[in-house]
Amino acid sequence: MSQDERWLDYAWSFVRPELPPPPAEVLEIGCGQYGGLVPALLRDGYAATGVDPEAPAGPDYWQAEFEGYDPQRPLDAVVASTSLHHVADLGLVLDRLAAALRPAGTVVVIEWAGESFDEATARWCFDRLPAAVPQDEHSWLAARRDAWLASGERWPRFHAGWRAAEGLHAGEDVVRGLDARFARRSCGYGPYFFPDLAGTTDADEQSAIDAGQIQPTGIRWTGFRR
């Protein structure tokens, strides 16, 4: 199973129970070039659309940023999986997300608390990177490790510089923005890195979190439009 497949299986196991029943209309923000959760949504009978500049071609996808997408009618649910920390204007995207939902519409978010990616967590991940990665699988963790070692900097300085250069939003800012616009149902922190690690499951990562070896950087948030 590829890294992407492991992540999608994990994400779907969280997202699916939080959604209204099919045939609800669901939008996925940041579905990526392989379609994200849209195929699973369609398989389960949802009216699903994926929005992403790199989305696949086809009637179920919109190749654009969410800021430029106007749904034809109010949505029953919006799913955002590891996409909000990348957007240019977080407030604008969350405002548009709220406007796109019908009253009491569902919001399901999986995010990354990059500010909690401390050196102990980084080293734990780097020690578990696969020896070889297929060319078609992007290993962002390996790229971060190599860039850090080449920089000669201490981890906090290197990591802060990378996040600033990439314009990444802190997980706490994403959660704060969601809480300001929606009624929260749940918010939890847990595993995030395991799909990119060799011989490591989400349970393994959770055990390391519980033992205090690493930080929980995966955010799982659910709520609804007031």
Image (cartoon, rainbow, N blue to C red):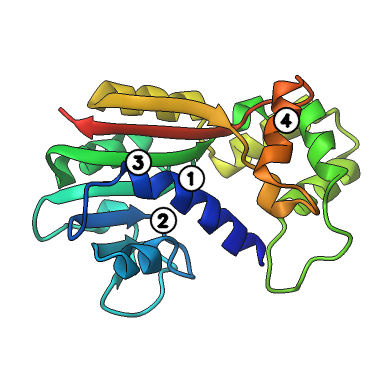
Q: Identify the residue at horizontal 43%, vertical 68% (top origin).
A: 35
Task: Return the x and y of residue 11 as percentages of the image width and height.
Answer: 49, 50
Q: Taking the image as drawn, is residue 5 in sight?
A: yes
Q: Where is 9 relative to 224, above or below?
A: below
- Which is more foreground, mark 1 or mark 3? 3
Give the mark nearest the N terminus, 2 or 3. Answer: 2
Which amino acid, by three-letter code, is at mark 3?
Answer: Val
1 or 2: tag closer to the N-terminus? 2
CB under 8 Å between discs 3 and 4? no
* Residue placed under numbered mark 2 in the picture: 30
If you read the primary sequence from the N terminus, does the residue marked by circle 4 or circle 2 appear first?
2
Q: Residues within 10 Å of mark 1 (few under 14, many from 20)?
A: some
Which comes before the other along the chain, label 3 or label 4?
A: 3
Q: Earlier in the sequence, mark 1 or mark 3?
A: 1
Mark 1 touching mark 2, by CB under 8 A? yes
Circle 3 is placed at which residue position?
108
Disc number lying in front (1 or 2):
2
Residue 43 or residue 79, whichever sits in front: 43
Residue bearing the label numbered 1 = 86
How packed mark 3 is, by other alpha carbons closer than 10 Å (few <14, some 14-19, many 20 or more), is many
Q: Is residue 87 visible?
A: no
